[in-house]
Image: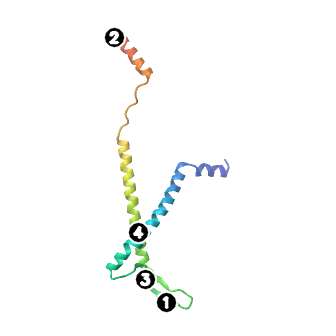
Amino acid sequence: MSIAQEFKKFALRGNVMDMAVGIIIGAAFGKIVSSLVSDILMPPLGLLLGGADFKDLAVVLQEAVGETPAVVIAYGSFIQTIIDFIIIAMAIFVAIKVMNSMKAKEEAAPAAPPAPSKEEVLLTEIRDLLKNK
């Protein structure tokens, strides 16, 4: 089997396509959560902490000199990233929990046995008639 055929077989499997869709949706969801944190949650939190803007919270290790930018530890951005992660992790946890509970309900409900075929019904009638003779 050539490499091209192997790759085609791999790429067209259902799991790979599902994974690709999940990654695309996850990236979009990550952007939404980042906007929620930076634009909605952090401003009121900064206001509660005395009007601090988390994007500006940093420790300057070396001031800017000429065209050389300052060397800083931007711990405010780090705090925002941690909050982003916590919200995304919670959302994924809840989604997986819901999917698992739906799957458990589906597995728990036994399927009704299929109706007997016409041949089985006919054979049962013949058996009953033979028993009665």
Mark 2 or mark 4, earlier in chain: 4
Give the CA distance from mark 1 to mark 2: 104 Å
Mark 3 or mark 1, earlier in chain: 3
- Asked if the residues shown at circle 1 and circle 2 are in contact, with their CB atoms under 8 angstroms apart, the answer is no
| 78 vs 6, nearest the viewer | 78
Question: Mark 2 falls on what kind of element?
Answer: helix
Question: Mark 3 falls on what kind of element?
Answer: loop
- Asked if the residues shown at circle 3 and circle 1 are in contact, with their CB atoms under 8 angstroms apart, the answer is no
Question: Where residue 51 sits in the image (x, y, percent)?
Answer: 35, 82
Nearer to us of marks 4 and 3 is 4
* Amino acid carrying mark 4 in the image: Leu
Q: Is residue 26 left or right of residue 127?
A: right
Give the CA distance from mark 3 to mark 1: 12 Å
Give the CA distance from mark 2 to mark 4: 77 Å
Question: Mark 4 falls on what kind of element?
Answer: helix
**Dot 1 corresponds to which residue?**
63
Mark 1 or mark 2, earlier in chain: 1
In percent of the image, x 36 and y 78: which residue is there? 46
Quadrant hosting residue 88 = bottom left
**Dot 3 corresponds to which residue?**
58
**Dot 4 corresponds to which residue?**
36
In percent of the image, x 38 and y 42: which residue is there? 107
In percent of the image, x 55 and y 87: which residue is there? 68
Mark 1 or mark 4, earlier in chain: 4
